[in-house]
């Protein structure tokens, strides 16, 4: 006996038979077709509007399906990983031919996991179309489980979602977005907001680079004398012309008209106390001469006028297999005297921001020269090391952060002062980020996987399908 799908009355009265042809999983690379004969049963209940119904086979068939349950599960799993066109191509190789539309239909039918709102959530945004459309993703900050995907990154949308799921949420991890901060404050006034430590460090890195560029005239003396490029000469020429006109009492707008420059460009040069030395360090690739650099350096120090042909014969005896032109170009570029003849602001800031234990001896020596260039650079190096020590969560870091901010404001470092002002604006979340073990790293990992999903879909799918794929386990 089989229960009626409408009233549930069991019946075994056969009204007739019905044949079904379904596709099953392939065997040995060959497609399998299953032909079944199922019963059409009659419902004995008088008040039931369903007089007859077809018998279903649990675990094998479902209504209106032309494939078995296990074959549908396999196609759905392939579509979940590869989406439409790629899933259709792979399914054809597996002897299960389906169209891309069929693969997407099976993908949409996959049930979403039961979403329970955790106590600690992470909130972040990702680009649907960069600089045009963004969406918001909410995850479990402790396990990385996806909780929800919102269609935009507006404060009202996040606030509405938080009000609907406010029960149980105690901690919210986020970046420095003021929009998310305001939405969380309105919807969950008692929740603890945690500012992500990686974003704090990233903001500090940007400000350190600006400070290093501002004091380039102090530490640039460590570079060997090199002729300036066209860009540096143009910068110096423009700076001289603009400051000559300003010294004569000419206004900024009149300067831009006389020199045929944009007004913002004139303003930027007017703020410069002296022209910047913009020298780009050459980016050299490894060559066959690199293993013999020390030998070339020693020989050129002993005999400055040693011919290149003699050097070529010597390093060929040591195993050099390159050409003579490669050696001549190597020496003319000055690479025998040092790996990096010019230290740029970006390179200098990288040395300041790197853990001293991870620096090589020559980089440590260069860092000491940069830090000793002027009192501001010395203070900047100390402040960077002090803030890096605060990024390991521990009790009392909020008090140490206050001391660090006071120490940073005591020096003439305007870019770093703006960083401290930003910390004060979001001080409660920053204190929680430096004292609590929570962070937004797993949410960033989910965003990375989301970018891979979007590349697979090539921007052709709608937001609903993208949200479905993100939320699938």
Image (cartoon, grey):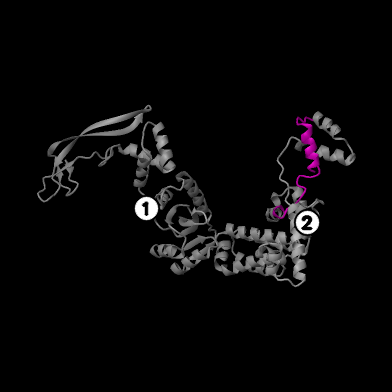
Secondary element type, mark 1: loop
User: Which residue in the protein does label 1 denote?
Assistant: 114
Quadrant of residue 325 in the image? top right
Nearest to N terminus: mark 2 or mark 1: 1
Residue 340 within the segment the image draws in magenta = yes
The image position of residue 368, as x and y in percent, is 77, 55
Q: Main secondary structure of the magenta part?
A: loop
Q: How many marks?
A: 2
Q: Circle 1: is it few (<14), some (14-19), or many (20+) Cα within 10 Å? A: few
Q: Which mark is residue 220?
A: 2
Residue drawn 49% across and 48% down? 449
Marks 2 and 1 close (CB-CB < 8 Å): no
Foreground pick, 13 / 319: 319
Secondary element type, mark 2: helix
Quadrant of residue 383 in the image? bottom right
On the picture, is 153 further left or further right than 378?
left
* 244 to 439, vertically: above or below: below
The image position of residue 300, as x and y in percent, is 86, 40
């Amino acid at each position: 006996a089989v229960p009626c799908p409408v009233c549930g009355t069991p019946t075994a009265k056969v009204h007739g038979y019905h044949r079904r042809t379904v596709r099953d999983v392939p065997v040995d690379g060959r497609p399998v077709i299953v032909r079944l004969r199922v019963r059409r049963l009659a419902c004995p209940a008088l008040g039931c509007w369903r007089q007859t119904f077809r018998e279903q086979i649990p675990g094998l068939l479902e209504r209106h399906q032309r494939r078995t349950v296990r074959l549908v599960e396999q196609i759905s799993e392939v579509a979940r990983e590869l989406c439409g066109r790629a899933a259709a191509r792979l399914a054809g190789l597996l002897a299960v031919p389906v169209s891309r539309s069929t693969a997407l239909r099976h993908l949409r039918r996959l049930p979403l996991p039961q979403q329970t709102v955790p106590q600690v959530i992470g909130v972040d945004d990702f680009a649907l179309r960069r600089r045009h459309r963004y969406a918001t993703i909410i995850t479990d900050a402790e396990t990385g489980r996806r909780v929800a995907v919102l269609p935009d990154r507006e404060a009202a949308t996040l606030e509405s979602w938080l009000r609907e799921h406010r029960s149980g949420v105690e901690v919210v991890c986020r970046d420095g977005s003021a929009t998310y901060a305001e939405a969380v404050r309105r919807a969950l006034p008692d929740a603890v907001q945690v500012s992500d430590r990686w974003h704090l460090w990233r903001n500090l890195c940007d400000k350190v680079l600006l400070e290093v560029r501002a004091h380039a005239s102090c530490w640039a003396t460590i570079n060997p004398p090199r002729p300036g490029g066209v860009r540096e000469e143009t910068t110096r020429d423009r700076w001289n012309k603009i400051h000559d006109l300003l010294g004569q009492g000419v206004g900024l707008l009149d300067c831009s008209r006389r020199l045929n420059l944009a007004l913002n460009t004139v303003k930027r040069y007017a703020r410069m106390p002296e022209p910047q030395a913009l020298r780009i360090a050459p980016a050299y690739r490894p060559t066959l001469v690199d293993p013999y650099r020390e030998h070339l350096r020693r020989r050129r120090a002993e005999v400055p006028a040693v011919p290149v042909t003699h050097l070529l014969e010597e390093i060929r005896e040591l195993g050099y297999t390159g050409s003579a032109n490669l050696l001549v170009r190597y020496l003319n570029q000055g690479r025998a005297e040092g790996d990096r003849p010019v230290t740029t602001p970006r390179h200098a800031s990288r040395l300041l921001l790197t853990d001293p234990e991870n620096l090589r001896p020559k980089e440590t020596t260069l860092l000491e020269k940069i830090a000793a260039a002027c009192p501001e650079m010395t203070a900047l190096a100390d402040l960077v090391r002090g803030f890096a020590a605060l990024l390991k969560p521990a009790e009392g870091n909020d008090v140490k952060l206050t001391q660090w901010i006071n120490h940073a404001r005591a020096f003439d470092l305007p870019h770093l002062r703006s960083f401290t002002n930003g910390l004060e604006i979001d001080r409660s979340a920053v204190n929680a980020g430096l004292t609590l073990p929570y962070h937004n790293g797993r949410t960033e990992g989910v965003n990375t996987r989301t970018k891979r999903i979007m590349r697979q879909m090539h921007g052709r799918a709608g937001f609903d399908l993208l949200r479905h794929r993100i939320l699938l386990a």
